[in-house]
Image (cartoon, helix red, strand yellow):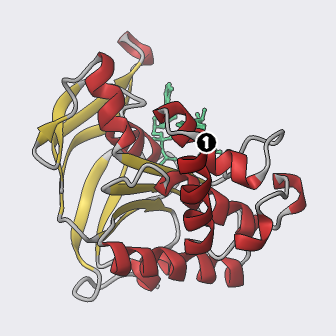
């Protein structure tokens, strides 16, 4: 589903240059929950931002489906980005909009009619177990509920791929468990491919089938989670 080949990302120039990604290659099969594990500064955000086309790599190539996305610009780039959903550590909800309006936002951008948006939002909120919170504002929700809204919004455009950027790092262990179970359920029911980055081994153990370990911009180890001798 996602093929990353010899990806390099250098920020800045000259003696201020930082090599955030150093020749990273990964193969993420369709339908997989793939984890990238690493400490702060390892290059995880840079990697996921390159996949989401928020960041342009210095060199290397990323393919999603059968499309090379790293060479796109203009409308094709926007279309490629719409085929990926993303969830964030701090949820990134619009505070002045209700739950339903937050979820409807990408559908509005896509140009869906009001009635089509309403039925899709209902479906999405049911999918994440938040059908009772249509009219609530983000400030009235718990962290776990906010992330459910984030997941519903990320799935609004029926993406092939869900990117998760430390999506449970701001949540307590019980809520983390529930959100990860929801992601696993979505993966099973919809065949959704999930690329998640985390600094927590426990997250990888709970839901990932494969993992790559990133250190100082390089993949130092990768394989099936049940075959790697992972540190606790
Ligand atoms: P992680 O997500 O694993 O914490 P990042 O991808 O955020 O790692 O950062 C990897 C390295 O790149 C770090 O050394 C960080 O300081 C540097 N870095 C990240 N973003 C930028 C940027 N916009 N400009 C310069 N350096 C950056
Ligand atoms: P962090 O986890 O580092 O605190 P977030 O995960 O909340 O930060 O956000 C990561 C980056 O994504 C930020 O630089 C933010 O500007 C950007 N961002 C925020 N909202 C969106 C969005 N809806 N789509 C794409 N990128 C976003």
Image coordinates of residue 62 in percent, x first then y, are: 19, 40
Q: Is residue 12 visible in the rendered structure shown here?
A: yes
- Left or right of 37 in this view: 122: right
Q: Is residue 169 visible in the rendered structure shown here?
A: no
Categorize mark 1 by other alpha carbons within 10 Å: few (<14), some (14-19), many (20+).
Answer: few
- Left or right of 153 in this view: 58: left
Image coordinates of residue 192 in percent, x first then y, are: 33, 67
Element marked by disc 1: helix
Q: Residue furthest top?
A: 14
Q: Residue at x 76, y 65 (%)?
A: 143
Q: Quadrant of residue 125?
A: bottom right
Residue denoted by label 1: 114
Query: In front: 186, or 22?
Result: 186
Instruction: State whether residue 63 is above or below residue 73.
Output: below
Q: How many marks?
A: 1
Instruction: State whether residue 191 is above or below residue 174.
Output: above
Q: Residue at x 57, y 52 (%)?
A: 153
């Amino acid at each position: 589903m996602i093929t990353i080949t010899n990806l390099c990302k250098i920020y800045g120039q000259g003696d201020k240059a930082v090599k955030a990604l150093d020749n990273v290659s990964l193969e993420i099969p369709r339908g997989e929950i793939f984890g990238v594990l690493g400490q702060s500064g390892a290059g995880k955000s840079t990697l996921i931002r390159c996949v989401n086309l928020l960041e342009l790599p210095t060199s290397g190539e990323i393919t999603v489906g059968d499309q090379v996305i790293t060479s796109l610009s203009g409308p094709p780039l926007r279309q490629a980005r719409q085929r990926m959903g993303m969830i964030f550590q701090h949820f990134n909800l619009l505070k002045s909009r209700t739950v339903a309006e937050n979820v409807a936002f990408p559908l509005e951008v896509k140009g869906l009619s009001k009635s089509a948006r309403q039925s899709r939002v209902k479906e999405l909120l049911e999918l994440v177990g938040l059908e009772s919170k249509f009219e609530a504002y983000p400030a009235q929700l718990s962290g776990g509920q906010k992330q459910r809204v984030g997941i519903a919004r990320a799935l609004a455009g029926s993406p092939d791929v869900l990117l998760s950027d430390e999506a449970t790092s701001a949540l307590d262990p019980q809520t983390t468990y529930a959100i990860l179970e929801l992601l696993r359920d979505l993966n099973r029911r919809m065949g959704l491919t999930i690329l998640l980055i985390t600094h927590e081994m426990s997250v990888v153990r709970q839901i990932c089938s494969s993992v790559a370990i990133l250190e100082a911009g390089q993949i130092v180890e990768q394989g099936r989670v049940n075959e790697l001798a992972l540190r606790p």
